[in-house]
Image (cartoon, rainbow, N blue to C red):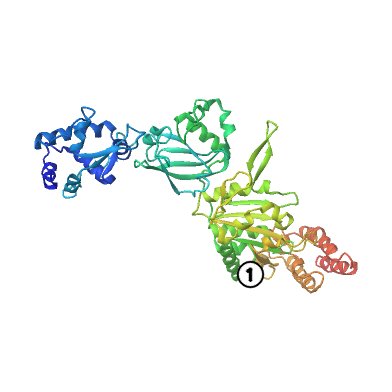
Amino acid sequence: MTAQDWVTLLQDKTVFNEHCLQIMKRIKDYGGEVSCTQLSAKYGESKNFYNANSSALARRVSEKTDCVLPPNRDSRDSKWWPILYVGKYASKQAKSEYIWKLRDPLSKALDQIDLSGVDLFAASDDENAEPSYWWMNANPKIWSFSELSVGEVEAYTLYNENGHKRRIFQNFIDAKAGDLVIGYEANPVKQIVALVRVKEENDGKKIFFEKTEGLSSPIDYQTLKACPELKDMEFFRNPNGSFFKLTQDEYEFILDMIREENPLKMGVSIPSYTKKDFLSEVYLSESQYDCLVDVLLNKKNIILQGAPGVGKTFCANRLAYSLMGEKNDRQIEFIQFHQNYSYEDFMMGYKPNESGGFSLKTGVFYRFCQKAANQPDKKFFFIIDEINRGNLSRIFGELLMLIESDYRGKKATLAYNGMAFTVPENLYLIGMMNTADRSLAMIDYALRRRFSFFELEPGFETRGFSDYKDNLENERFNALISKIVELNEEIRRDPSLGKGFCIGHSYFCGRGKDTCTERWMRAVVDYDILPMLSEYWFDDDDKVQRWDHILHGVFQ
């Protein structure tokens, strides 16, 4: 038959009913060559819907046109197919999978008629149906949930490289958009590392998964295997395959385990925090604040260094607030380095477990990076006090590269578990270093290149501290501050000390009119300032005594 003959038949509703037009439209949409399984998987309806309606259509075409059937067909139904299609088996081994291809005249005729009113996809039986639940194995030697960013979509083929169906093929067919998936990394990781959903159901060739959350504390295989509630899980009964069905109870039990280690924070009202708030609390000038912000946003890593009492910790915390625009401690992690701090504490390592063995545990920085990656539209701040007290090369390991601003978002394989890891773009590191600590060696040069250094100085002469002092309305306090300013000038001029040893303003902050008492001021002088001067000038008692008399003279 010619294309024009097919056009006439296509417009005859006694030959091409609504179901038959749907089949034609779907085959054209798929590319003109497809199996019943693929049609069912992508567009809905059962395989029998396509088989039965194609056979019935072919009979009607034969009756209408008296077209001759090819002889010696194997079955009563299949003999009708060649009227509409030419075809072949999907492979020599897969005798059950037959590929249809529209005959050229029929294909050309379909191009000439309007099928816009014909449904491409079958209507859902229940659009409000509950999602199904699944377990997906990722082979980290081929692909990894850990390598995906939150919101990133992974396409997974329904057929392997040899063209064979994946194991438990029906699971891929049954999965629908919106279904919930547990993301598991297979050997050697053997952990649940992500929560996932089916982004798009299969198109006959691939199914599409979207990562919705990375787990800062993954769940080990052995922990799951020991739970009697999961003993009948499809994955545990027959682990051969990649995509397994979960019951709702199994999914919710696993999710409860995940939430124990990776809790979601409930929404609460969070106060806003602005640049103005920062300048009222942290005694920097506006130009210094602007410079500090520019340096941190550009480099992503900064070290606040300065003398004792300049408010490095307070400044770091408030700087994070001001850049977030709110006082949200959930997006801040605070740690302190020391001589025994290690990579195993910071990133991951083997730690003793209850059974007397060792388990691989993630460290604080690893978990915080996962937390930041789950909310890429927000800023997160990792604050390290006493950053120069730790063995930095030992603590950071391969992170020395990943924390660089140019390498943010790049992936590197971790030594302990072979998983890909990245430091997110939205994570900022703020270190703090006391310049007056004589016992500390120079900071590691490799780390120095990756951080910018910002000097914090005593803020006695800033507008913020001046306003604070005026609000106290205390002349004795004003006199004491004047003497401290003079003391700092002498410390700066001392060739064995310098500005890094000045007395910071934070010793004198945090008071109101009722609490700014002479007793408090004397305590600061006697137990903070003078002991520090004794250490600075340990070989010059006369200088220490002179300043003892000057400072105590304020209270005469």
Q: Residue furthest front?
A: 72
Indicate whether 378 appears above or below 46. below
| Residue for point 56% across, 29% down | 225
Indicate whether 412 appears above or below 168. below
| Residue for point 18% across, 32% down | 71
Q: Position of residue 122 (x, y in %)?
A: 27, 38
Q: Position of residue 251 (x, y in %)?
A: 48, 33
Q: Residue furthest bottom?
A: 493
Most foreground residue, 296 or 484: 296
Reading the image, the residue beneath label 1 is 463
Most foreground residue, 216 or 110: 110
Residue 240 visible at all: yes
Figure label count: 1
Q: Secondary structure at mark 1?
A: helix
Q: Position of residue 528 (x, y in %)?
A: 79, 59
| Dot 1 crowding, Cα within 10 Å, few <14, some 14–19, many 20+ | some
Most foreground residue, 39 or 136: 39
Residue 512 visible at all: no
Say whether residue 90 is left or right of residue 475: left
Say whether residue 122 is left or right of residue 130: left
Q: Quarter-wise, where is residue 485 in the image?
A: bottom right
Q: Position of residue 150 (x, y in %)?
A: 48, 48
| Residue for point 55% across, 53% down | 411
Most foreground residue, 477 or 343: 343
Indicate whether 458 appears above or below 157. below
Say whether residue 520 is left or right of residue 31: right
- Under mark 1, the amino acid is Arg
Q: Quadrant of the N terminus?
A: top left
Q: Quarter-wise, where is residue 357 in the image?
A: top right
